Amino acid sequence: MLKGYLKLLDFLKDHKRLFGIAVVAMFISSFFEGFQLSFLIPITDRIFNQKEIVLPNDLPQPIMDVVAWLNGISPQTLFWTLPFVALGLMIVKHIFTFIYGYTMNDVAQRVLRDVRMRLYEKLQSLSLDYFNKKKTGELLSRITNDVAIIENAVSYAVTDLFTQTFLLMTYIVIVFSIHFKASLAVFLILPWVFWPINAIGKKLKKLAGGEQESIADISSILLETISGMKVIKAFCTEGYEINRFRGKNHWYYKLKMKSIKRMKLLAPITELFGVICGMLIIFWLGRQVMDGELSFGVFTVFLATILSIIRPIKKLGNVNAIVQRALSANERIYHILNEEPTVRERAGAQPLGELKDRMVIDHVDFRYQQDGPDILKDCCLEIRKGELVAIVGPTGTGKSTLVNLIPRFYDPYRGRVTFDGIDLKEASFQSLRSQIGIVSQETFLFNETVAYNISYGREDVTRSEIEDAAHKAYAHRFIKEMEQGYDTMIGDRGVRLSGGEKQRVTIARAILKNPPILILDEATSALDSESEKYVKEALDELMKGRTVIAIAHRLSTIMQADKIAVMDQGRILDIGTHDQLIERGGLYKRLYETQFDVT
């Protein structure tokens, strides 16, 4: 546990100075809180009972000197002095309580900010294959729920860990100073209290892991169902989705109640300890008070201090429970932070100039997992500058995977992809990807304005340039007809736009980027005839003077391509023009005859 907690506290290292101030303030506040009882009660007893303060004779001489000094002051003088001294001590204590409370919350919020930022930066650095394996809701849960648990551990748990430990040590000094043997007897009972607290803490850590996995599942279902509400309505599966959510929600409730049950056990365990200790003290020291060997005020201090020990022990038990939950969350956070991208930019990666001659996919094999099946098998394809190269084949043959190697979204398992003879692994991401524009079937637009989506990635662009790109994409007319034109918010994933309109906004974005290389991944396959007409005209405008790699199911859109690569089962079976491929027969001819009903 200690190693895990130190790893958790590693998030504090950037805020050591602020944390140090908080710890000092905690110590001072705890000191005043711990000694206020031992200061006030005996003096009050001296004032109102007008009896001397009586302590055991074996205490250190400085304490005996202070007691002798207090006994030498008249009760009347103490009566008029005590309220002002008590008020002063209370003010000092609360000043330092405020300082550490505010400072520790500041530290916690800084840690929360930093951890979220580290997680987000890490997610941005990871390769696409990581997101193919993870559910979006699970990742959202890591950044929201798990980080919130870390906040509790850093603010409340760390604060209580220090303040209650300081307070406990203060109480221990007081009771051992008053009566060593009675204190020793009490603290021999203490291990029997910590044993169940520790056992409960370990169980809570295990339960916390299940809780966070369960809330991640709930987040995933919410994200899926809210995003796919149209599909749910269309298939009348509201009841099924409600039952699916009910199951996950009830399981989370059960896990939560198991944690709550164990948390609630901590209070009676510590209370029982207090009752036993109180009985022991009354029977032991009560007789000494009756015999005059101990003043009633000192006895009251001892009893009150022993009973006060219950509070820091109880809070430390809660600290243990919070820390155990935080350790579980911390492990899941570090699962992300320790993840390494599979596609890396090498140190000293060289910038690529604009394509001068050709790109070559050179005997490439690819698999998504190291021990998984080959998705691409010995693929070879040459793409010359200015060519329109089409890739066709049945669904699931690896066409999109092949083109995803060009911007280095993935790296080949074997073989290489070169750019004017330079292996893409030697090139910087920025210089490579800045030359490539992508328009795919699955358009993605941000829940922002039309202008923001068109200009995405370009901070220096003017409104006239945005409108010019929209004109070329045949999007200007429908944009101007919208409620606020280019400043209209288009909703989550562009929900306020039709499929054809979303596609044209995406094309306008690509036109504004002005890339020399263009990848079209079935950009018109999901559109109706009218939308396809506008999008095709926009694509024709976009493709002018560029090197284009186009994936297409509709062969009519790529019959004029300079080169067509025919794929099946992860292999490139044939390469040629439309006429050459028809003449050779084979898969391309069968696809052509099927689509055009040629018999």
Image (cartoon, grey):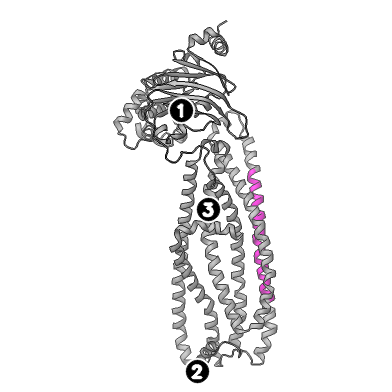
Q: Nearer the viewer, residue 355 or 70?
A: 355
Q: Quadrant of the C terminus?
A: top right
Q: Amino acid at mark 2?
A: Gly
- Residue 418's label in the rendered image is 1
Q: Is residue 484 visible?
A: no
What SS does tag 2 mark?
loop
Q: Quadrant of residue 445?
A: top left
Q: Which segment did they paint magenta?
A: 248-276
Q: Which residue is mark 3?
A: 148
What residue is pinned by disc 2?
Answer: 72
Queried whether the magenta region covers residue 74, the answer comes back as: no
Q: Position of residue 271 (x, y in %)?
A: 66, 70
**Is residue 400 positioned above or below 5 on the image?**
above
Q: Nearer the viewer, mark 3 or mark 1?
A: 1
Q: CA distance from mark 3 to mark 2?
A: 56 Å
> For the residues marked 2 and 1, what is the alpha-carbon distance in whole angstroms?
95 Å
